[in-house]
Image (cartoon, rainbow, N blue to C red):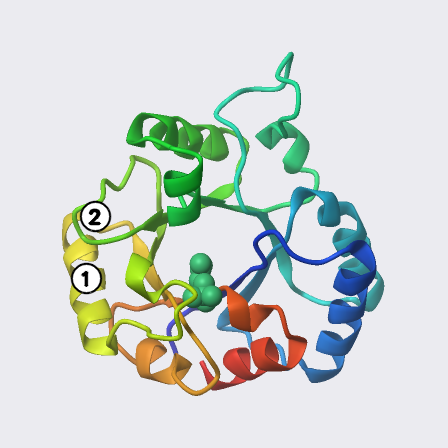
Amino acid sequence: MKKQYIIANWKENKTTEEAVSWVSEFSELYVPHEDKEVILCPTFALLPALSNELKKLGLDIKLGSQNFPAFEEGAFTGEESPRLLKEFVDYAIIGHSERRNFFHETEDLLEKKVSLAKEYSIEPILCVQDAETPIHSGATLVAYEPIFAIGTGTPDTPENAQVVSLTIAKEHEQVSVIYGGSISGENVRSFTEKDGIFGVLVGSKSLNPQSFAEIITNA
Ligand code: PGA
């Protein structure tokens, strides 16, 4: 069986109490699978508590951040450098369309972030909106997330997602492509069963432990 990445993007949601209760409910439902790498991407503020909680429960789940700045540690008020994040995370989402859109992130900036992530041994999950979006050097995990499918309940077709994934992989042999946008327990398999799609990035349906556990089981 191919290795799959099942990634939860919690976006700007959950207090510590809500996150801890999510983990406790999830731990009752989660069936680990050696070919499925499960990664939780919460807000920065939740990372220490979640890291403790996962250790306490012995859950083999990795943590990721949803972003980080293109700066090294130093006099950058309000930022969380990869050197500091590395204490908690193995992965980082980079270039999500919400960051490109609301925070005007450019390809130059994303290129720097990918290389900074690699420097600190954080695996970047580079989000692209189509097959034409640049894949920056060093990126090996790419999430194809068409904007029309994000948070709308209307995913891309698995057939089109496969075409985009294979187009990206053809030009970038080192890259594993995953799909994101309105993934649910009902539709996940139709994507992950396609050659060239190595997992899913899940927004809304990852906020509920039951629906996220169902996605992992069905993937
Ligand atoms: P969604 O979000 O699953 O709610 O569509 C996906 C994402 O933004 O990564």
Q: Which residue is mark 1?
A: 164
Q: Quadrant of the C terminus?
A: bottom left
Q: Secondary structure at mark 1?
A: helix
- Could you say which is closer to the camera, residue 140 or residue 167? 167
Q: Position of residue 204 (x, y in %)?
A: 53, 68
Q: Quadrant of residue 154?
A: bottom left
Q: Position of residue 122 (x, y in %)?
A: 53, 40
Q: Residues within 10 Å of mark 2 (few under 14, many from 20)?
A: some
Q: Position of residue 217 (x, y in %)?
A: 53, 84
Q: Is residue 193 above or below residue 72?
A: below
Residue 148, above or below 141: below
Image height of 17 relative to 117, above or below: below
Asked if ligand 1 lies within 8 A of label 2, the reply is: no
User: Circle 2 — which element?
Assistant: loop
Q: Viewed as shown, does residue 19 lie left or right of 157?
A: right
Any mark on residue 43, and which?
none
Q: Amino acid at mark 1?
A: Val
Place residue 112 in its image quadrant: top left
Give amino acid for label 2: His
Q: Which mark is residue 172?
A: 2
What is the spatial separation of the Cα atoms under label 2 and label 1, in whole angstroms? 12 Å
Q: How many marks?
A: 2
Rendered residue at 65%/36% (across/down): 85
Q: Quadrant of residue 1?
A: bottom left
Q: Nearer the viewer, mark 2 or mark 1?
A: 1
Q: Residue at x 16, y 47 (%)?
A: 132
Q: Tell me which label, 2 or 1, sits earlier in the chain.
A: 1
Q: In which quadrant of this rendering is ligand 1 seen?
A: bottom left
Local packing at callout 1 (Cα closer than 10 Å; few below 14, some 14-19, many 20+) is many
Q: Is residue 201 left or right of residue 87?
A: left
Please indicate whether residue 69 sits to the left or right of residue 171 in the image.
Answer: right
